[in-house]
Amino acid sequence: MQITRQADYALRAIYHLTKLEPTQRAATSQIAQEQRIPPSFLAKIISQLSIAGLIHTSRGARGGVMLARKPEEITILEVVEAIDGPIALNECTTAPESCPFGGNCPLRRLWCGTQAELVEKLRNTTFAQFMAEAANSTVIAA
């Protein structure tokens, strides 16, 4: 399973905004440059994050993008689902009838359990927690 590049970019954009002061705005060009996101791709992502209520946007000379809520109130899951929709490791986790074995599939229980663990982990990880962990970790050069 792999999240989409768009969801990864959305996480990077929110990460960038969590580093700012609560009332500070960032230009999308700045986010794109610092997070290495293609500007045209970022525009679509910003729109989706705004619709999801995760960020506020404003145009003009004093415009930009800012978080709509505190980092402790935004989860990794919210951002991923705002872009990719609900997480599904396999089609059978949401539609058991799609499997030729139906409800008797020997793998369905594994997929459903693993998916539930992943969703719970992402739901319970806020950007505030993520930022704290990132600040405490060190990057080891290879």
Image (cartoon, rainbow, N blue to C red):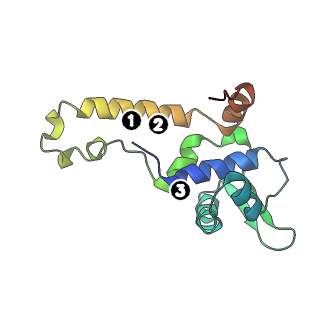
Q: Is residue 11 above or below residue 107?
A: below
Give the left or right position of residue 57, taking residue 115 as reference.
right
Q: Is residue 86 above or below residue 33?
A: above
Question: Which residue occupies the foreground of this view, 42 or 72?
Answer: 42
Q: Amino acid at mark 1?
A: Gln
Tag 3 secondary structure = helix
> Residue 26 at x, y = what percent?
79, 58
Q: Residues within 10 Å of mark 2 (few under 14, many from 20)?
A: some
Q: Residues within 10 Å of mark 3 (few under 14, many from 20)?
A: some
> In the drawing, what numbered circle is on residue 64?
none
Q: Is residue 29 above or below residue 3?
A: below
Circle 1 residue: 115
Circle 2 residue: 119
Tag 1 secondary structure = helix
Residue placed at 61% from the left, 58% from the top?
49
> Residue 19 at x, y = what percent?
78, 44
